[in-house]
Amino acid sequence: MLAACGLASAEDLFAHLPEDVRLKQPLALAPGVSEYEIVDYFRGRAAENASAYASFLGAGVYAHYRPVLVDTVVSRGEFLTSYTPYQAEISQGTLTTIFEFQTMICQLTGMDVANASMYDGSTALPEAALMAARVTGRHRILVARTVHPEYREVLGTYARYGHLAVEEFAYAPESGGVNLEEIERKLDDQTAAVVIQSPNFFGIIEQVEAAAQIAHRRGALLVVLFTEAVSLGLLRPAAEADIVAGELQSYAIPPGYGGPFAGIIATKEKFVRQIPGRLVGETRDANGNRAFCLTLATREQHIRREKATSNICTNQALIALMATVFMSVYGKQGLRELAEQNLAKAHYLSGQVKPRFTGPFFNEFVASTNGRSPEEINQALLKKKIIGGLPLTRWYPELENCMLLCATEMTRRAHMDEVGRAFQAIEHAA
Amino acid sequence: MSYPEDLRYTKEHEWVRTEADIGTIGITDHAQKELGDIVYVDLPKIGALIEQGKSLGSVESVKAVSDIYSPVSGEIVEVNESLAQAPEKLNQDPHGAAWLVKVRMSAPDEVKKLLSAADYQAYVGAES
Amino acid sequence: MITKVRSHITQNESLLFERSSPGKKGYQLPELDVPPVDPVEALGAANVRAEIEGFPEVSEVEVIRHFTRLSTWNYAIDLGMYPLGSCTMKYNPRVNELVARLDGLAWAHPYQPEPLAQGAMEIIARLEAALAEITGMDAVTLQPAAGAHGELTGILLIRALLEKRGDPRRKILVPDSAHGTNPATAATAGYAVENIPSNDRGMVDVAGLERIVDKDVAALMITNPNTLGVFEENIRSIAEILHKKGALLYMDGANMNALVGIAKPGDFGVDVMHLNLHKTFSTPHGGGGPGGGPVAVKKILEPFLPLPRLKRVRNKWTFDYKRPRSIGRVRAFYGNFGVMVRALAYILAHGGNGLRNATVDAVLNAVYLRKKLEPYYDLPYQAPNMHEVVFSDDRQAKRGVRTGDIAKRLIDYGFHPYTVSFPLIVHGALMIEPTETESKLELDLFVEAMTSIAREIETDPDVVRAAPHSTRTRRVDEVTAARRPVLRWKPAEPASKAAD
């Protein structure tokens, strides 16, 4: 091959690079190793993480059973190793699954159109906010304190540079849901959107309809977020929302220490040209057969460049496919039954400990530790190979002696009883 | 196609037809040919103020977006809503049924700076 | 004569909703070990949904057949070469998939106690260090979820530094050959974008740059090698011009597959850059994502990196949130950890020398293709190419055939098309990047296909213009898809309704 290129040696390939730019030393990296050694290395790292612990952590990342079929499907080379479906003739597999995905998200959220996924829920939020700003021509965003704290941080980063003014509003201290009067007070004619999360970070289901009415009266859009997709199987969809954004990790996406996940943005028909990210549409091919293709691409960066709706160049195709397989396996009845099991587990757990808030909750809630530190309770639980709930003072200093507990269909009664005992033991000691 | 004599033209391939103080604006046949199949038109709302030479919206094909530059200044008084359902009209009848907007002109004399049909014909003949 | 492919029957398949039938089940949940709870009692009727209308109900075998059949309609790296320029479609090693699925890694919760997450943190730290070494930079963040996300992070870092110096400035310069994400990113970060033209060698015009760079310019976003596959030979001067005026140099690392082990961006004046784990570092594209867009920076930008950062305290890893100058978070949690695992596995497998060898092979393959195809396709820029080569369709356009048509005909020959019509500075571009994965055998088949198509254009251009002919799906009507978008399935209207 070198001869065909008219070169004497491989080094000649780089002869044209400036001398002072070419490396004289090899990279200071360990030499390459065998497949066995690679597996061994990562097994070692995996063993240094929690293994075979029961966990009561939720807070935006949930432990749900992953049907075997999910990995069977996404491991197929035709899905795993394929490229973005720009060439529709040889990508109908990917395009069809995305079309199905878009449809199922619409069915679950009550919206008219959904995109082919965003990076994750936390980045879907600022994209939704920017979209609301484009639609309304306004620049203020009102966001509930009960939206996931890290999501709010991401919104803050994007807002600072995207000419958005973000203001937070409080939650009602008894119910744990948003304070509707606060929204009313802070709304003005420059508010592009009111953002709430339901179920919220505390697990409480929000009054979506009421919030929508308040927002719409002042010409603002309502953005509703979700982080626990399993709730969509049971809870009334936020049909009054203008934009729904959220995280699909609960749908067979491994918690994976925080990623990769898949977010979504869904909206009403009238806003379709302002939606960021990829869209797949139905059409026909030259033989008249139904076919799918990427469409409305003129919103996107590769065409509109600096005037694009977003700089996003990816959708989480493989991750979204995991969710699509999950949704197919469970189906209409399964998603309902799964959600009902989650409800039952969490409500059993709430009977073992004392919920802090009175609002209705799905599979997460804040428990009061009655004057003792949540860290102490968690230390006791660790000895039983149980990871307890999440202490909240890091983000909510007013919620001392509280922890956020989550129970899913994978949570065992015996472990919930242990948690109950750990809470009581502290009580007796107090 | 021959370019209608009663229209005035811009070098960015827009046209305007004036009746009293109302200007009807569109894109030329040359423009629609360059764009190919038109899929969408983004137009301003009634009441919007536009300026000669500034963008008043855009027209899209599958793979490209082009700004539409206004031939005249004024206030939008009517928008051709039929283009939302049938953007292909722009490919079929760019000088007639596929007009984009009607403007109450604030400076009707601006039209004098634009090209006549003959000048525009020569201009696009030279361009191709 | 097409030798790489032959027709085969593939299964038809409807949409899940069209296969659905009430009562079909693909799942089984365990019996509840706690009392069931009535949703209406617990939550109030207003909070409980009616059934999910139109949602599919199918059996397990229907699920597996559905997705398996659909998968057979896709092209993939596992089937053959993707000559897509700037995409670096290299082999996705399967050991990466195995290690990413190890329970202790796949089931780790980002909030689990740090003493129980040391393995995950070690992986993050090790990958950060490896990428810093590869790029010659001082610090790396793995938080961004994709290349474009990394670009945004990088530009926000520049902005934060300039703001600390008292003036964020107004403009970012972008070469006219740049990928669309570059100007889109600059605009998202609140900057105005100014295009700078390329010279006749396809590189940034240094004299032109000198004239344009003033106190209003925050940075230049450069891709090196650029989107023509050509190394910016004046890169050091470019960096100097910017630095003299207090501006920074951002490098889009999409083309790192030409540089790993050969040159380090940190050595030639780059202040901040992003990498694409799904390109250079072999993590799978999966039909469009996920990816990973790490950002590597010089010391001056380190204080502004997204938080948290890993810190070593008393021989353990911990996350450091005390970073007052940080731009904040660009996403929740720590980044696409699963993608990091795969990228690290790739780096471990190759080691320093292996990575360099991969680069040599990638560049050799592209130069080979250039030599073989030069007699048939116009080469608009003569400078030496690295890991990719860009031709133009000028010669073929005379016969009424454009790059898009040639790309579609390539499908009939058993290949995925190359990158069409990009970069924009080349008229009718054919952008070809083979990567190191392809053997001479596969490359020669590609050359044979491209030269055969060139001959077809001379004798029978229609066959190219109407391609592809042998795919299951023929050319799709993108115009109608855009004019009257149908973005979801809807149940058919009952006949009586339609009559009304």
Image: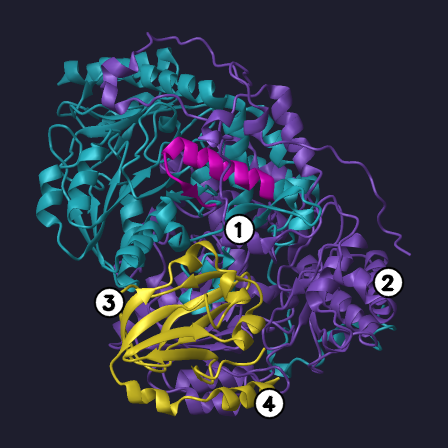
| Mark 1 to mark 2 CA distance (whole Å) | 33 Å
Secondary structure at numbered mark 3: loop
Task: Say whether residue C391 is left or right of residue B98.
Answer: right
User: In the rendered image of this protein, which colour is used for chain C?
Assistant: purple
| Mark 2 to mark 3 CA distance (whole Å) | 60 Å
| Mark 4 to mark 2 CA distance (whole Å) | 41 Å
Q: Is residue C300 above or below residue A389?
A: below
Marking on residue B47: 3
- Please name the residue that numbered disc 4 is placed on: B126
- Residue A387 horizontal/vertical position (percent): 35, 26
Q: Nearer the viewer, residue A27 or C397?
A: C397
Please, what is the three-letter code of the amino acid marked with disc 4? Ala
Please, what is the three-letter code of the amino acid marked with disc 3? Gly
Colour cyan maps to chain: A
User: In the rendered image of this protein, which colour is used for chain B?
Assistant: yellow
Would residue A59 be seen by someone viewing this image from the given angle? yes
Task: Say whether residue A50 is left or right of residue A376.
Answer: right
Camera-nearest label, 2 or 3: 3
- Please name the residue that numbered disc 1 is placed on: C291
Q: Is residue A230 above or below residue C249?
A: above
Disc with the residue nearer the chain's start (3 vs 4): 3
Do labels 1 and 3 touch, CB within 8 Å?
no
Residue placed at 80% from the left, 36% from the top?
C9
Quadrant assignment, res A77: top right
Secondary structure at numbered mark 2: helix
- Please name the residue that numbered disc 2 is placed on: C448
Q: Residues within 10 Å of mark 4 (few under 14, many from 20)?
A: few
Q: Is residue C299 above or below residue A192?
A: below
Magenta range is A95-115
Q: Nearer the viewer, residue C417 or C357?
A: C417
| Mark 4 to mark 1 CA distance (whole Å) | 48 Å
Would residue A352 be seen by someone viewing this image from the given angle? no
